[in-house]
Image (tube, coloured by chain):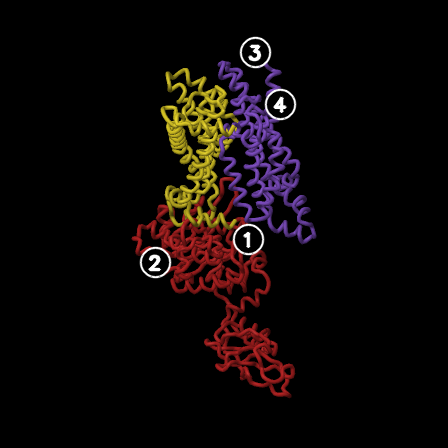
Chain colours: A red, B yellow, C purple
Amino acid sequence: MIRFDQVTKRWPDGTLAVDDVSLTAPTGQITVLVGPSGCGKTTLLRMVNRMVEPTSGDVYIDGQAVSNQSPAALRRGIGYVIQHAGLFPHRTVIDNVGTVPRLLGWDRRRIRDRSMELLERVGLGAELADRYPAQLSGGQQQRVGVARALAADPPVMLMDEPFSAVDPVVRGQLQEEFRRLQADLGTTIVFVTHDIDEAINLGHQVAVLRVGGQLAQVADPAYLLAHPVDDTVAAFLGRDRGYRALGFVASPRLPLRSEEVLLVGESVAEDASGWRLVVDEERRPLGWVEGGRVSGVVQIADLDLGGTLAPVDGSLRAALDAALSAPSGRGVIVDDEGILLGTVRAGEVLDAIAAAERPERGNA
Amino acid sequence: MIPTIWSWLTNPASWSGPDGIPTRLIEHLGYTLAVVAVAAAVAIPLGVWVGHSGRARWLVSLGNALRAVPTLGLLFAATLVIGPRLGGQLAFVVPSIAVLVLLAIPPLLAGAYAGVEAVDPAARDAARGVGMSGWQRIRQVELPCAMPLLLSGLRAAVLQVVATATIAAYVGLGGLGRYLIDGLAVGDYGQTGGGALLVATVALLVDGVLAVGLRGLISPGLRLRAGRA
Amino acid sequence: MDWLAQSYGQVLDLTWRHLILAGLPLLIGLAVALPLGYAAHRWRAAYAPLVTISGLLYTIPSLALFILMPLFIGTRILDPVNVVVAMTVYTVALLVRTVADGLDSVPEDVERAATAMGLGRIRTLLTVELPLAIPVIAAGLRVAAVSNVSIVSVASLIGVAQLGDLLTDGYNRVIMPELVTGIMACILLALALDSLILVLARMLTPWRRAREVVSA
């Protein structure tokens, strides 16, 4: 557990970067610090490993004040990932990953084994081990950055906008992988971003800061979306809050209808009308065809692919989106394996939403 | 003209004795090595420290301002001021060597400083963040990353010394410059031109050897990046 | 001071000669380096050879180059043309790389925007790329100017008249005021050329001043 206890940072020129913030980042969870530029989120993060010394107050890791520990030793025990990865350009990938173990004096064999294991863990092939950072894409560099931070198996990790310099598709992948990795390792993470969607997507707990370094609100993402504490937080959270909040409401048992399906390769009846769902041999949905528009054997190229699929144990947001996006108006619900269970209409999802309990957890 | 130079270069007398080409060449290279070693021992640590700490940047500006002072004037002034206080051979050698050291410092200082200064801020931040001490950051990150610029500063310093040592023959220093100065004094173009050819060749060879020899000190990772930009 | 009062006319004359010997090569050198630098910028394959050859030329010590010049251009050994040509060689050697790097420093999207608006290659170069490269080119030109002024004084060893004469004569006859005057005149000339280029570059790039004001 990381506890910020009434920390304040005033720069020598008088600017107040962090203003009397108290906050707890629970063990094994991701706490996201989010806010516009100039809100002091990075400054707050850097107090944890003493890259910034608070003007007053202190930070405690598992009850130990960081101000009592030597900066170098403290930092070797805390993973640190930054925006442009900050890889050492003169060292190979594997040497970058082994930086902290080497500082800790591990023997070479052990450093090498650990580094290779981590490369695999962050989804990089062994063939990249002896490349230099300049030979990697931005996304790969960022993965190496994460591997380097994890090298000495730190219980705590600090991440400062680690995914903001990569393109949106790669960012999405990195976020997903990172979430899984964190769940596996149970690392306590403090994560800084200016991107509220990233905060909502990754955080177990989200702390919104405002310009001037004040803590505006701390809550879990669902609560935050449902109950922003004031107008500035609401404005920062952005549009479609109600819809996005549905992403945190597990879908109850929806009244599924069975769907008459076509197997790919089957012929559409001459006189057919309306939309028919096309599935493969294992009943995995492939897309929709409209009767009358297509005649003869159904080809993959004939399919309308607009509809999204909602997992049966997914959120209400996914179910509603499936219904809204399907050309037939019938949302496709699948099981864990991606096999068709049935369809649901938007109206039915809305009824379920009306009946669902709104998030009341979290606190201000 | 070319025949005169050729006959001087091929005359066995030019190649023997205390005034022969091998002796002068060794003198010239000896001065260069000694001067650059002393200057580097002062300027490189200083430049790295200025780049690392961000303090005393005026030192680098001062070094650059020194380039406006004519080297010839500096040599003469040093010889006239320092020379008479020393006796014998020292009166000629010490002022020249001092000036050569002084002239070798600015490129070394600027190269070391600029090299450290140019290290990717994210890499420096990461070096602190993973828990490296100040010395470890210099040793493991800043110095290796500064190598390309630091070494071009070194090459510039070596060339500066090779060139200025030639001129310093006018105030009595040995080395290959003797042929140019003595030849000019007596109107012996064969000796002057031959000496000039030797000096030019030595400069090109020394620079070539350094360019190739120092490559090994630069991480391939840094060369890759330079290649991309 | 007495010495300076007596030799005022001589110092002015030598300063003028020095200015020509150092300044003329700056102008010729820039005129030669611009097309070469553009070639190095435009064709990647030309960059390495051009920059390498420039580097090699720059490597040759000044006194040696002055003396060897007649071999290449068929002049007499005391001819001031030797100095002008040698200094031009140094200037070109220094500026080819500077011009190429300066043009490289122009953001690619600016060049693309110019092309997209229908500007031809030559017009883009003259009205967009070169003006934007001025700060980098000017910085290189300043280095060349200061170094030229210092190197030209060496030419007094081969009997070409300029401020270096005050240095050699002051040394040979142990006239300290003459030596000091020579050094000071060289420094002042270097600073004057340096400032002149700085001012010209500022005048040619008014948009940079605007940015300074905004960021201040």
Q: Residue at x 45, y 42 (%)?
A: B148
The image shows residue A231 at horizontal and vertical percentages of 59, 57
Which residue is pictured at 67% across the width and 54% down the height? C116
Task: Please identify, in this view, whether the residue under mark 2 or under mark 1 is nearer the observer.
Answer: 2
Disc 2 versus disc 3: distance between alpha carbons?
79 Å
Name the subunit of mark 2.
A
In this figure, which residue is indicated by the disc labeled 3?
C2
SS for callout 3: helix
The alpha-carbon separation of the residues under discs 1 and 3 comes to 70 Å
Contact? badges 2 and 4 (CB < 8 Å): no
Q: Residues within 10 Å of mark 3 (few under 14, many from 20)?
A: few
Q: Secondary structure at mark 2?
A: helix
Task: Name the secondary structure under disc 1.
Answer: loop
**Image disc number at residue C16:** 4
Marks 2, 4 in one chain: no
Q: CA distance from mark 2 to mark 1?
A: 38 Å
Q: Is residue A96 left or right of residue A247?
A: left
The 10 Å Cα crowd at callout 4, few under 14, some 14 to 19, many 20 or more, is some
Q: Nearer the viewer, mark 1 or mark 3?
A: 3
The reply to whether the C-beta atoms of the residues labelled 2 and 3 are less than 8 Å apart is no
- Residue behind mark 2: A114
Asked whether the beta carbons under mark 2 and mark 1 sit within 8 Å of each other, the answer is no
Q: CA distance from mark 3 to mark 4?
A: 22 Å
Question: Would you call the spot at circle 2 few (<14 residues within 10 Å), some (14-19), or many (20 or more)?
Answer: many
Marks 1/3 same chain: no
**Amino acid type, mark 3:** Asp
Q: Residue furthest right?
A: C118
Front residue of A96/B189: it is: B189
Q: Earlier in the sequence, mark 2 or mark 1?
A: 1
User: Tag 3, which chain?
Assistant: C
